[in-house]
Amino acid sequence: MSANPIQRACMASDRDSSRALCSCIGVAADATLSRSQMREGARWFDDPQRAQDMRQSDRDNDEVMWRAWRTFSTLAEQRCS
């Protein structure tokens, strides 16, 4: 199975991330995010300000993305910590 956008962004980031951790995070993303949400979230690894802008946005689509991201991050934290 090929890596999803979140897993690839994790591996490419400057953070101290192991292949196992990024794989676990990828599994959490597969369980909670659509492919388009994964692509958007992967951009946040390189541009955290983009995530902040979306979090503060009043647009309905941004709110849906932010809620999905919170669900993903909670699951990733539970399973991958």
Image (cartoon, helix red, strand yellow):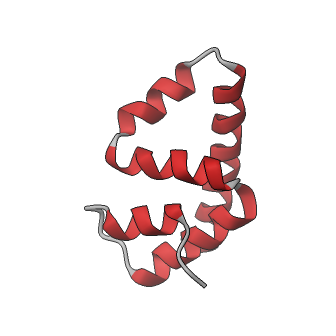
Q: Is residue 32 left or right of residue 40?
A: right
Residue 56 percent location from the top left of the image: 54, 20
Instruction: Identify whether 66 is placed above or below 30.
Output: above
Left of 70 or right of it: where is 4? left
Q: On screen, 52 above or below 71?
A: above
Using the image, determine if residue 5 lies above or below residue 51: below
Q: Please state the horizontal and vertical placement of residue 4, each as a whole percent of the image.
A: 55, 68
Q: Quadrant of the C terminus?
A: bottom right
Total numbered badges shown on the rendered structure? 0
Q: Residue at x 47, y 83 (%)?
A: 20
Answer with left or right where residue 59 lies relative to residue 46: right
Tell me which residue sits at (70%, 44%) in the image. Answer: 68
Q: Is residue 47 above or below residue 32?
A: above
Q: Quadrant of the N terminus?
A: bottom right
Give the residue at x 47% y 73%.
22
Find residue 23 and report its horizontal and vertical position in percent: 53, 78
Q: Is residue 40 left or right of residue 75?
A: left
Residue beneath the point at 46% across and 24% down? 53
Furthest toward the left, the residue is 14
- Nearer to us in this view, 38 or 15: 38
Quadrant of res 78: bottom right
Residue 5 position within the rendered picture, expressed as x and y whole percent measured from the top left: 51, 62
